Amino acid sequence: MIELPDIRDIELKICWVIALAPEANPIIDLFDLRLFSNELDFPVYVNQENGHALVISGIGKTKAAAATTYLKTLLNVKKYVGWINLGIAGFHLEPVGRLFQVIKVHDIGSKRSYFPGLRLSKIVQHQTLFTVSQPETAYSDSVLFDMEASGFCEIAPMFSCNELVFVLKIVSDTPESPIGSISKKTITQLIHQNIEHLQKIIDIIEKLVSDEKKRLKIPEEVFQYFDKYHFTQSNRHKFIQTYKKWKSAFPNRKLENTLATGNSASKLISSLESELVSAIKEWKL
Amino acid sequence: MIDSIFAEREVLDHPVAQKVIKRLKHADVFEIERYQEMFNKRQQNFRIQKQNPALILARKHDNFVLPAPQGFGLDAQKNYYFSHMYNCIYDCRYCFLQGMYSSANHVLFVNYEDFFKAISDTIDKNTDTSLTFFSGYDCDSLAFEKITGFAEKALEFFTNFSSVELELRTKSIVSETLLNRSPISNCIVAYSLSPSNLAGVLDNKAPSIERRVNALKTLAKNGWPVGLRFDPLIYCSGWENLYSELIQDIFTDINIDKVHSVSHGPLRFPKEMYKKITSLYPDDKLFSFPMETKGGIVSYGTDIEQEMSLFLQSELEKYTTKKKIFRCLV
């Protein structure tokens, strides 16, 4: 167990939601994740250095949804973070061990469908998945079967966006390789044998997260003015918006120079606006 | 290229859907119930989705033909538009589609027959009025033609209504569908144009201006009426020279009789749409310009709009008659 850090200090990139410990262990090893606390309702693992966090949800869509919410709340996960539900799934076709990105999740119970994630077509095959409440042994449709994904897909996009929510499933059982024969060890092996492939997928997701963070994050230099001057909620919003325009127009200018003479929120905003207006004649795209 | 097709179960057997699936033979096909379950979902990220949009095949049930917004049309008494597709394969930074839909996926409505029926009904109801139908309001009319074959069908249809005009608005240079057949005098192929170095920055994934100008000149040479659409007008330092050179380039070596109309219009966004688009691309220089907001519309402001409009008007009048020039105010 690690010493509980201040959650504001944790810069996360990817949150994993995984049903079972044997599925999670290879990811815990890969990213050197440490148990956050053993007094939590769901086991949570974190590595502050590389920005990965993981929650073990247990079996079922309700638990998957609850664990996703729990992780979000516990670590105050930001909007730009990617979410991955990784696990095993039943499929009508061999071979066991094949990795899929699920791009359509259909909940058999509620009849609702979800379309998670940017489709990473160049590096991973796509498949439809049905989330069921009991293990599927008839393999009655040519789709994957699991018990968690729809719960995860119902909740995770609220905390980020649909395109940063990924469902990755590895075939664990088929009509030829029935579910009864899967041991904990086998499950861990199935994940292990896909680690290289998963790493490629994670690299792409981390790039998406980095771009999204750049888009959404408010630069630190803005906050010093919030501490120094009184901003109404509306002025605060306007200051951020004008700052973003100003920064895009003058990436090399220093904010402190432009705002040197301002002594109120409205004067700070009008200083930024004035510089933009004075650049109109020489405006370049 | 499109790697995934999501098709409504009820259209899977439609001949157009079958053709599209055959043409995109490397794409995976997934069944869905209704396109809205995917297209209208909340929490979608248009910017990320635009990196790899899917194609959705769907049936449109109503509103096949709609009145064009005020100020959109040319000189017809009544203007209508229809959208057989939502979204565009290009990624032009000023495009209103970025703020219009929460999804960047392409929706193709495969029941073309219902569009033509609705157009036909509209024509029947307006026999004593001049009519123009605009295609390419919610998509590019020709960019996806090799896959959809819609323009080809539309041309066949409008051949039978010679007094009614059809405008195909495009940035595409895929003009085989047109060049492989005799020109239709009531079909105007209208090109969206802006100075080359502005288009180079803003018209992502779209053909260069040089190629667009070549394509429109080839069409004019082959007898097709062409439209020139300087819309939206983009402001920057030296814009006068840039637009002046562009207009000169276009009118050099073009069959002037085939220039059906020229229109220009300012860069404008409804306030909420502007907010949505700028939040997608906060670092884009186009949106750092100190725009004005008036009456719920975000624009460069009256002074710049007026200056640009007057300049364009006077430049265009050097090459064509006033009656062919229109100011678009949508």
Image (cartoon, helix red, strand yellow):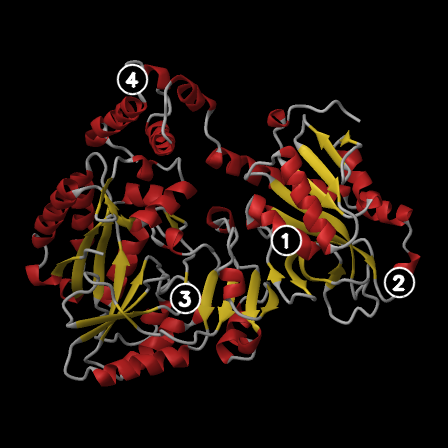
The amino acid type of the residue labelled 4 equals: Gly
Q: CA distance from mark 2 to mark 3?
A: 45 Å
Q: Please tell me whether mark 4 sits on a helix, a strand or a loop.
A: loop
Q: Of tags 3 and 4, which is closer to the observer? A: 4
Q: CA distance from mark 4 to mark 1?
A: 47 Å
Q: Please tell me whether mark 2 sits on a helix, a strand or a loop.
A: loop
Q: Which residue is mark 4?
A: A262
Circles 3 and 4 in contact, beta carbons < 8 Å? no
Q: Which residue is mark 1?
A: A153
**What residue is drawn where x is 38% and y is 30%?**
A236
Q: Which residue is mark 2?
A: A178
Subunit of mark 4? A
Quarter of the image that includes the N terminus of chain A? top right
Place residue B180 in its image quadrant.
bottom left
Q: Is residue A144 above or below residue A42?
A: below
Subunit of mark 2? A
